[in-house]
Structures are given as structure tokens and as C-alpha cells.
Image: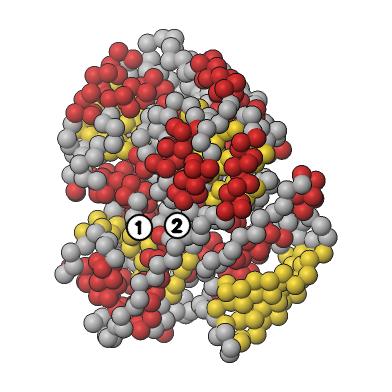
């Protein structure tokens, strides 16, 4: 068989049902092999869209996402998607065509050293130099992408390798089990938790990646211990009543105050990112820090942990639940409850205009519980994180580590392919929407019932907010008041579209959008003065939260 | 901070580039490097002298994560870093984690 046929066969054998991609000269043999394959290829309209759709597919399904591109510009267009997956530990396989082996290194037409360019944003990468290596590489690539701390893997395949005939040797499937936490360490951790008067769990995206959400929920219920989440962990412990919400720069006050007041912080699958911790020296400064993770490189990377624990999460958490039946922390629970009620959201905003936080809260009340929201990046992303409810982290697709504007629309497309029956909503800003606008064509072609909630503040709101607060209102290139008529744009791609501008239209607008079974867009016009609150200014401690008026 | 590392690495496409990239990106300078192909383990034997302001483990843990790194040993490490001071002061000790490939 040909190398190209083997690549597709190997993906089929690994259970891959969808590929997101875009064809071109150096990848033509693989596209030829696709013609006879059961895999569904989704033609996105930009390779960045393809990579981000594969990312959304992976996050929703929990399995690997696959994207495909040609050499040169096709490959370079994938890079943002690879970086996005890298920063958020998403299992992704990117296959790129390359010029023929004898032309590599000669500046041939569309020859780019994508292997070199992608190195900083992949977990691992390969250039296939001999077709006989393909079986080994395909199998390893899938294993690397999905095991341990997942991440993107690039396979660059020269055209002659794709065309080469060979008889593949069967490869042994690689499986390695995750290490289990040593008993000594576990006992030490339990000891510290038992001694603590004010213990707090700090939940990161790793919990969902480690498929430990249910185990963690059970542990929380048993211990009745307060907990906070990172952006990526939102949804992991769903409606656990002692969950104080997201911590960090735009975190909930109760969550940030709890961090500052706890005496024992137990971080699980979290990486002490600067947007979560604020000023590091002031972060949980009174606490003994326990850190459970699968990636040793995260231990004491930014904040020294008193006890570092490497082990598979389900096993570790189950054993801890056995070891500690209950925690006697009534006073602390009460204190946290008080914080929760004292700092509960207030959805009353003056005026008749649409108040985005209230609308988003209502959106999740109306959305089926397994619904997926894919956000873009900016103020609307933070409002989603603050005001929407999710029953698993896989329901909230948000570009956390990279903050990639333009993520939401392709991610929603990926999610809709992963789960055809699920209600998938892209909440985007007017700036972000334009970044991968071409993917409306993908939605049109496949008639995906993706719902787009476009929150239009006629500006790059998040940047405007920072210019207002930290650059003396010297507004620079944030005005988008000359936006096109987004309803007309949507209609041009055969989406149903409506516009709302008044608070009294919100309920009907949301109902219309959610009841539609066709691709649709709800254009929501809001004030250009609205800010995201609270806000921990850059470099400040998480206890220094700014609060402003709603306009 | 100044340290001497010994690294065994697969002799694969891009191995050395990855090593150099991670070292640069994580904030370390290479002051000396010696590479030789080793028949026995079919890979590179590398000695690397690095200097930097950051704690050595921030580098070694990242290097250890590279798929091509088979083994990494710290041969010498000059000056106590902030992490050791932290553990000395708090009475905790740094856990050793088994490395799995
Ligand atoms: C690709 C990319 N370019 C630039 C930025 C910097 N950035 C962060 S938020 C933001 C504004 C986003 O505007 P919009 O999508 O309209 O959302 P809003 O903040 O108004 O809700 C910008 C430019 C980014 N995150 N990603």
C-alpha cells in the first residue's frame, strides 16, 4: 500500500472518525486516500479554523482531534491552533504534507521547515524520512498526544513518502499506565489536611483531562470542603454548593478571598498560572501548599509547594477519601458561606440596554444541561466564565492558556461534529467573530445547527477596558463602530439571524436562538462602556479586586 | 547557578534542537557542550554546562519531559537555590518522583 493510504488506515484503526483540514499540492496523496475511506473530512476554510475545530472536537469528545494541511502556508496556518492546544493540553494530531524529500532544504515551492517552526508548540513532532517508519510514527504520535499530560503532535510527511509503496509491519499498541501516588506521600498529605483549619481545594483543568471529575465531586461531597476553580476547570464540580467559583484576575470575590485566607491549599491539576494567582508572593501566603499533578514539571515551577504529589488522580483521590472520612472545619465553612452570600452577583443594572452578565446567566438557565458553549476571547469570555453554569469542563470551551481570539467559532464547529445532537453555542465578541469569520462557510456547507451569540460592543472591549483603567483613557485602535451589519453577514451565509438591542428583547431572542434547529446568529448590541468586574490589576494581589459601576 | 548535566538522548530528527530550544526558552545559557553518538544506547551522550538565574530543576524537569531524553543526571550543581532554602526553612522536603517515559 501507499504511505498516504497507510496514514488514513492507521487513523481509522485508532477510531478516528473526523478530520478537519484543507487540501493542497504536498498533501494530495493523503486527500486521494480519503476518497475511499470511511473517515469524514470536514473542509474548514482556513487551516487555523481546521486546527481550532479539531481542538474543539477533542475537548468535547475527550479523544484526539485530527487536522490536515498542505506544506508551506497550509502548515504555517496551523500554528496558532497547535499553540492553542499546547497551552491547554489538548490531544491533537496535525498531519502536514511536505515537499518531496530530495527537495527539502532547497527552498522549493511551498517548502517551509514546519518541523522547526512548530517545535515550541508541540508535545512532540516527526518528519517521516522513510516510509517503513510510518507505522511506528503513527502509533507513537497518537499515544504521545493522548497519554500523560496530553498535547499536540505534528507529523510532517514528504510527498514521496506519501506515494511510496510498502508492506507495513504490524506495530504493538503502546499503553503505559500512569504512576500511582506513593503511600507515604498520600499519608503526609492526609496528615496536613487533617491538621488544617481552613483547607481549600484549587481545581485545575487537569481534573477533567485526568477523567477524575466524578471522583473529585464525591470527595468534595464527603469532605464538605470549600473549593475554587481555574478557568479551565469551570464545570468540573458543577453545582457542588461549596464551590466558590473561578479564582484569579476576573475571579469571584469569594474565591479570591478564600485563597488569601486558607491555611492549606490543595491544588489538583492546576498550574499556578499568573491570571489565576495574581501577585505570586501574596497568593495563598498563609497556606501549606499540596500539589497533585501528573506533570512533574509543574511542581514548584512558580510557587513552591510544601508537598508535591505525582499520581493518577482517581486513585489518589479515592485513597484520600478512604483515609480521611470527614474534616472538622465548621468555622471555615461558615466563613466561606458568608463570603458567598456577601459577594453574590448582582444582576440589577440601570437602564434599558442589554446587560450581558444577566443575559448569559439566563442563557445557561435555558440551555439543555449537556449544552456546549464555545467562547472567544475578551470581556464576553470572562462573563461566560463568571455567569454561565456547566455540568462538566468539556461543556465549556475556552482558550485559556493562549487566549486565541477566533477560537470560538471553529471550536463550536468541532464540538458540533463531536456531538451532532448537542446544543452548541458560540458566544463571541465582535472583534473575535471577525477573526475566523470564514468558518461561517463551513457551518453553511454542513448545515451545522451551531448557534452564534454575538455580543457586540462595537469595540475590542477587553483592550478598551485596560486602556481606560491602566492607560489613562488614551484609546488606541479599539474602536469597531464601523462593523458591518452582522445580521446581513450571517444571512449571506444562509444563517437565520436576528438583532436585539433592548433588555426587554433578551428573553425572546434567546428563546428564538435556542429553539432553532438551523444555523443561526443572534446579534446582541450592548453598550461600549461596559467593563468586567471584579478585576485584579496586573501585578496586584488577588485580594486587591477593583470593582466598578455597570453602565 | 552553574550546573553540569549528563543527558542521554535518542539520535532522532531534531533531538539536539529540542534540547537547545528548551534550554534557551526556560532561561538558561549554555557555557559548554559536548555531544557524541553512542553505539551502546544508540543515541547521543551529551554533557551540558548551563548557567542561569533560575532554579536548575525548572530546566531539568522540562528537559526530562522531552520524548527523546532517555536519561538525565546532574553531575554537579553549584550554589544553593531558593527552593532548597524554602525546604530547609519550612522543614518539608522535596519529593522525588519516579520518572516514567
Ligand atoms: C489573536 C488575538 N489577537 C489579539 C488579542 C488581544 N485581545 C485580547 S481581548 C481582545 C479584544 C476582544 O474583542 P472582542 O472579541 O470584541 O471581545 P470583547 O472584549 O469586546 O468582549 C484583544 C484584541 C488576542 N487575545 N488574540
Image mark for residue A64:
1
Secondary element type, mark 1: loop
Between A146 and A43, the one lying in front of the other is A146
Q: Answer yes or no: is residue A200 visible.
A: yes
A79 above or below A455?
below
User: Residue B74 placed where, x, y %?
Assistant: 72, 69
Give the chain letter at badge 2.
A
Q: Which residue is mark 2?
A: A150
Q: Residue at x 26, y 49 (%)?
A: A418
Q: Quadrant of residue A215?
A: top left
Marks counted in the figure total 2
Q: Answer yes or no: is residue A262 visible.
A: no
Q: Residue at x 69, y 75 (%)?
A: B6
Left or right: residue A494 compared with residue A322: left
Q: Residue at x 33, y 63 (%)?
A: A68
Between A202 and A478, the one lying in front of the other is A202
User: Residue A442 placed where, x, y %?
Assistant: 25, 48
Between A482 and A463, the one lying in front of the other is A463
Left or right: residue A512 compared with residue A273: left
Q: Residue at x 45, y 28 (%)?
A: A386
Quadrant placement of the N terminus of chain A: bottom left
Left or right: residue A402 compared with residue A507: right
Amino acid at each position: 500500500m501507499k504511505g498516504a493510504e497507510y496514514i488514513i488506515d492507521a487513523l481509522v484503526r485508532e477510531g478516528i472518525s473526523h478530520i478537519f483540514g484543507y487540501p493542497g499540492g504536498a498533501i494530495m496523496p493523503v486527500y486521494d486516500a480519503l476518497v475511499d475511506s470511511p473517515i469524514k473530512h470536514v473542509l474548514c476554510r482556513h487551516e487555523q479554523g481546521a486546527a481550532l475545530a479539531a481542538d474543539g472536537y477533542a475537548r468535547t469528545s475527550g479523544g484526539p482531534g485530527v487536522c490536515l494541511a498542505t506544506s508551506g502556508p497550509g502548515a504555517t496556518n496551523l500554528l496558532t491552533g497547535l499553540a492553542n492546544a499546547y497551552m491547554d493540553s489538548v490531544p491533537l494530531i496535525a498531519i502536514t504534507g511536505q515537499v518531496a524529500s530530495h527537495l527539502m532544504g532547497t527552498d522549493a515551492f511551498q517548502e517551509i521547515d514546519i518541523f522547526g517552526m512548530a517545535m515550541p508548540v508541540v508535545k512532540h513532532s516527526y518528519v517521516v524520512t522513510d516510509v517503513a517508519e510510518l507505522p511506528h510514527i503513527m502509533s507513537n504520535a497518537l499515544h504521545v498526544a493522548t497519554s500523560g499530560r496530553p498535547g499536540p503532535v505534528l507529523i510532517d510527511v514528504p510527498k514521496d513518502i506519501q506515494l511510496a509503496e510498502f508492506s507495513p509491519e504490524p506495530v504493538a499498541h503502546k499503553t503505559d499506565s500512569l504512576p500511582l501516588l506513593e503511600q507515604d506521600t498520600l499519608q503526609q498529605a492526609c496528615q496536613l489536611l487533617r491538621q488544617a483549619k481552613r483547607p481549600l481545594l484549587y481545581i485545575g483543568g487537569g481534573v477533567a483531562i485526568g477523567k477524575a471529575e466524578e471522583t473529585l465531586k464525591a470527595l468534595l461531597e464527603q469532605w464538605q470542603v470549600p473549593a475554587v476553580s481555574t478557568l479551565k476547570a469551570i464545570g468540573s464540580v458543577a453545582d457542588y454548593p461549596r464551590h466558590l467559583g473561578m479564582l484569579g484576575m476576573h475571579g469571584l470575590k469569594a474565591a479570591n478571598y478564600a485563597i488569601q485566607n486558607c491555611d492549606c491549599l490543595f491544588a489538583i491539576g492546576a498550574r499556578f498560572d499568573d491570571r489565576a494567582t495574581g501577585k505570586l508572593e501574596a497568593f495563598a501566603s498563609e497556606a501549606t501548599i499540596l500539589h497533585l499533578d501528573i506533570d512533574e514539571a509543574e511542581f514548584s515551577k512558580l510557587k513552591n509547594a510544601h508537598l508535591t504529589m505525582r499520581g493518577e488522580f482517581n486513585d489518589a483521590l479515592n485513597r484520600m477519601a478512604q483515609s480521611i472520612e470527614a474534616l472538622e472545619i465548621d468555622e471555615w465553612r461558615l466563613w466561606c458561606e458568608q463570603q458567598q452570600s456577601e459577594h453574590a452577583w448582582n444582576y440589577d443594572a440601570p437602564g434599558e440596554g442589554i446587560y450581558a452578565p444577566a443575559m448569559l446567566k439566563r442563557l445557561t438557565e435555558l440551555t439543555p444541561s449537556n449544552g456546549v458553549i464555545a467562547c472567544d476571547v475578551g470581556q464576553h469570555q470572562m462573563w461566560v466564565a463568571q455567569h454561565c453554569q456547566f455540568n462538566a469542563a468539556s461543556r465549556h470551551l475556552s482558550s485559556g492558556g493562549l487566549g486565541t481570539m477566533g477560537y470560538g467559532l471553529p471550536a463550536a464547529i468541532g464540538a458540533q461534529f463531536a456531538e451532532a445532537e448537542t446544543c452548541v453555542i458560540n458566544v463571541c465578541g465582535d472583534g473575535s467573530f471577525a477573526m475566523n469569520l470564514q468558518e461561517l462557510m463551513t457551518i453553511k456547507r454542513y448545515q451545522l445547527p451551531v448557534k452564534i451569540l454575538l455580543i457586540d460592543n462595537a469595540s475590542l472591549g477587553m483592550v478598551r477596558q485596560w486602556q481606560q483603567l491602566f492607560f489613562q483613557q488614551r484609546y488606541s485602535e479599539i474602536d469597531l463602530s464601523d462593523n458591518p451589519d452582522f445580521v446581513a453577514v450571517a444571512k449571506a451565509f444562509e444563517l437565520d439571524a436576528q438583532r436585539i438591542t433592548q433588555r426587554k428583547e433578551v428573553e425572546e431572542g434567546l428563546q428564538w436562538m435556542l429553539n432553532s434547529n438551523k444555523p443561526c446568529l443572534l446579534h446582541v448590541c450592548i453598550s461600549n462602556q461596559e467593563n468586567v468586574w471584579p478585576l485584579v490589576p496586573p501585578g496586584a494581589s488577588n485580594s486587591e479586586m477593583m470593582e466598578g459601576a455597570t453602565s | 547557578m552553574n550546573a553540569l548535566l549528563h543527558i542521554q538522548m535518542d539520535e532522532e530528527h531534531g533531538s539536539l534542537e529540542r534540547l537547545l530550544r528548551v534550554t534557551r526558552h526556560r532561561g538558561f545559557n549554555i557555557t559548554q557542550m559536548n555531544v557524541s553518538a553512542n553505539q551502546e544506547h544508540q543515541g547521543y551522550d551529551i554533557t551540558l554546562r548551563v548557567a542561569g538565574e533560575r532554579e536548575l530543576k525548572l530546566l531539568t524537569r522540562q528537559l526530562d519531559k522531552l520524548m527523546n531524553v532517555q536519561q538525565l543526571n546532574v553531575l554537579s550543581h553549584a550554589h544553593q537555590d531558593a527552593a532548597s532554602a524554602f525546604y530547609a526553612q519550612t522543614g518539608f522536603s522535596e519529593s522525588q518522583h519516579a520518572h516514567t517515559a
